[in-house]
Amino acid sequence: MPAKTLTAPNMLSREKALAATGNRGVQLASDWLLAHAPDECSQQLARTLKHVVELQRVNLEEPLKLETYVSQNFMGVFVAEEHADLLKRIAMQYVKEFSNSTINLEPHVKSLHLTLAYQFPPAHFPALKLLVEQLQLDSLASWEVRLYSRDARVSSKQVHKVLYAHNPRESDELELRIGDYIYITADALNSTPDGWVEGTSWLTGCDGYLPANYTERTAESDAWTLHRTVGLSKLGVGQDIEGNGVAPSLQKPPSLGVGEPLSSSKPSDATSDSSEDKTASVYESHVEPLDKPDDAPDLGPITGPRHIFIIRHGERVDFTFGTWIPYCFDEAGEYMRKDLNMPKRVPSRSTGPQGFFKDCPLTNVGVLQATLTGEAMKEAGVEIHHVFCSPSLRCVQTCTGVLTGLGQVEELAIAIEPGLFEWLAWYPDSLPEWMSGKELLAAGHNVREDYKPFVRLEELTDCRESADQFYMRSFYLVQSVVKCTADVGGNILLVGHAATLDVCSRQLVGGVPRTSQEMTRLIQKIPYCSLVSIKEAPEEGGWELSDLPFPPVTHSNNMRFDWKVLLT
């Protein structure tokens, strides 16, 4: 290849890539550059859509009109002819803009409609017709034109969402995680002799066998990538926004092809500058830890080598009982426990019962695990002076349990730190709606209302995160915690998730970040309330993993008992 001149902007980009990855090698910096490289073709597609819609939008002086259509085997809503023509002109003009390019586009000129019911039994016709007649089609609405893309390599497969988590027991099995989507062929589903099918993870790109009843077919659009949203009606509230500004239910990171590791995925090319700045504020400044907050408690100087204890949360309700919310809450939202291992009561939260879907509580066994661990720490003479916790309810409850066992629950307030939350790739649609500080206090948790987190919640929202960025976020956090407590000294407790034990210790003790595949394999070996200790090594000028002065907590599975088995 002919030699290329290295321009000043290229030099600055490469220096920035090296700095953003902690000067840990050319390969890692190259991956960072690839993940931040703009796709000019995608950006042009998004800009052109905005231009075309704005040209035609001047002709829309009133909200879009909708008309119902009812027959014996179909019911739907159609766009009125005068407005359908406007939408078709937008499609035709958009295709015309790219007629001379290498992109193959075809306009959608069929009747624009929304299917409400199709091929239903004749007996259902009266009830369905009544429902259609009750629709208020003149209600205020905000119409948008959206530009999506999808991976063509999986276009012939069905998209299934994961209902239940599954840890592989054999080398050819596929790990299932809540929030992931699985690509499965119809043939595999129809021909399976034992309920196991081969699928591809949307999250990691890995192939493997999985139990089909652990998944449920969902809309293909769940695995699409949104590039641009343009408000259509001048009378509505819709605004032109980039891919990061859409409703969480439709925002996804780019879908992955077969065999593509998540760490190499690129953000949406239409991502706004503000989103990129948010990501940079977390990852690119990790070598400059924050100073001690002004409102940090003054404990006085504590001498001696310091220890950092990192613990995973205890047993969680959803992984133990599966789908539990519909069965444990009545129509009024009142909680009813269905098993003695379920909590007697759950905390009140503004989001109601559905708030527990992504932010579940601990089981009673989970609380016991945390309390036993705290009691063991106390018996071993361990004392905690600073405590930081993930905002997940299961982590806060675990933290309270550990501090209760330690006898420090009243004297030591919990700092809720969003930076301790688990890998964002496991939450592709949206983050959980965590309980507020006031709600946690009302639930009996001693949390600090004046704490200023090192990683703000806004920095995690709408953020696409590779495995390497997850490690960098966690390394930045633990460095910041160590530095801001250095003048006081004392031991630190970090309460998080399974991966927290590795991502918050790996680089601190001199290791390098693992790949996404290595990390997911490792966390399968980290059960509930696993705890690791990192000891300060002043002689070496760093930190090292150390043995714990107490044993771990271990117990067997206890399946649900049904007395009716005695009737057989």
Image (spheres, rainbow, N blue to C red):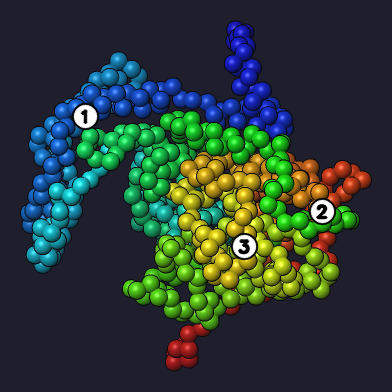
Say if residue 426 shows up in the picture: yes
302 lies above or below 19: below
Q: Which residue is mark 1?
A: 57
Q: Residue 487: horizontal and vertical position, in percent?
A: 81, 49
Circle 1 crowding by C-alpha within 10 Å: few under 14, some 14–19, many from 20:
some
Please state if 480 lies on the left or on the right of 438 as rendered: right
**Which amino acid type is marked by label 1?**
Arg
Q: Quadrant of the N terminus?
A: top right
Circle 2 crowding by C-alpha within 10 Å: few under 14, some 14–19, many from 20:
many
- At 17% from the left and 44% from the top, the residue drawn is 113
Q: Earlier in the sequence, mark 3 or mark 1?
A: 1
**Which amino acid type is marked by label 3?**
Val
285 lies above or below 495: above
Q: Earlier in the sequence, mark 2 or mark 3?
A: 3
Write down the quadrant of residue 73 in the picture: bottom left
- At 66% from the left and 35% from the top, the residue drawn is 285
Q: Does the CB distance between marks 1 and 2 fall below 8 Å? A: no
Q: Quadrant of the C terminus?
A: bottom left
Residue 447 - label: 3
- At 43% from the left and 63% from the top, the residue drawn is 350
Residue in the foreground of this view, choosing between 51 and 1? 51
Q: Residue 224: horizontal and vertical position, in percent?
A: 38, 41
